[in-house]
Image (cartoon, rainbow, N blue to C red):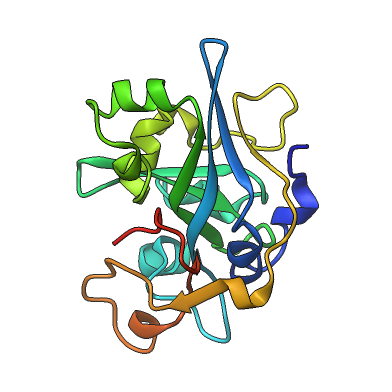
Amino acid sequence: MRLQRPFFARPARVVAQDLLGKRLVRLVNGRLLAGTIVETEAYCDSDQPDLACHGHRANGGKPTGRTAVMFGTAGFAYVYFSYGIHWLFNVVTGEPGQANAVLVRALEPVLGLEEMQRVRNGRSVAQLTNGPAKLTQALQIDKSFNGANLCDPHGVLWIEDAPPLLPAAIGCGPRIGLGKTPEPWFSMPWRYWVCGNPFVSV
């Protein structure tokens, strides 16, 4: 069953943890490509604005052409270009008007592995989706999905429900690739992963 709007309309840190174990699914030419979410990062409002978050870092914390989706309704995709090379897939969370999103960092591939390997130039299964740029390439997610409604029953990109993980199965630590983001946001433990899963990014 596809996750519905109320699941996403919660704080990013809560959604980031609850997404672990859920399945990200993409329909491509009648074929399903899917992976279990094993790593996420929360970018969110807290007691102070999160200066690692696009929505708070640019334009005085107001929406821009790039970040407008992030300020919108929960359950939509926020897809952006990173370093002029890679597409990264995020899920909008929280309440409209505030910048909240969860970056999906890694998947354990479960469906459509041959197609994933084709578009990933023959990479091994272990290297197909163990990073945020790798998984968007493997699932063929690009800028056309920015603003996509993940709750649309007819959509070709969605997240399926699965039983929640036990808290002991979830690790947490600082987010990755934040550049010159100042403290305390640089070290906030808002990255979450499935402990012991080999598909968590390096």
Give the residue drawn at x 39%, y 82%: 185
- The picture places residue 23, in percent across and down from the top left corner, at 61, 43
Q: Answer left or right for 137 relative to 113.
A: left
Is the N terminus in the top left, top right, bottom left or bottom right quadrant?
top right
Which residue is located at x 57 percent, y 55 percent? 71
Quadrant of the image occupied by residue 8: bottom right
Is residue 123 at all visible to an observer of this figure? Answer: yes
Q: Residue at x 35, y 37 (%)?
A: 125
Front residue of 94/192: it is 192
Where in the figure is residue 113, as x and y percent of width and height?
43, 28
Q: Quadrant of residue 155?
A: top right
Q: From the viewer's side, name the closer residue of 201 and 180.
A: 201
The reply to whether residue 63 is in sight is no
Q: Residue at x 40, y 53 (%)?
A: 199
Q: Position of residue 197 (x, y in %)?
A: 46, 60
Q: In the figure, is residue 165 to the left or right of 112?
A: right
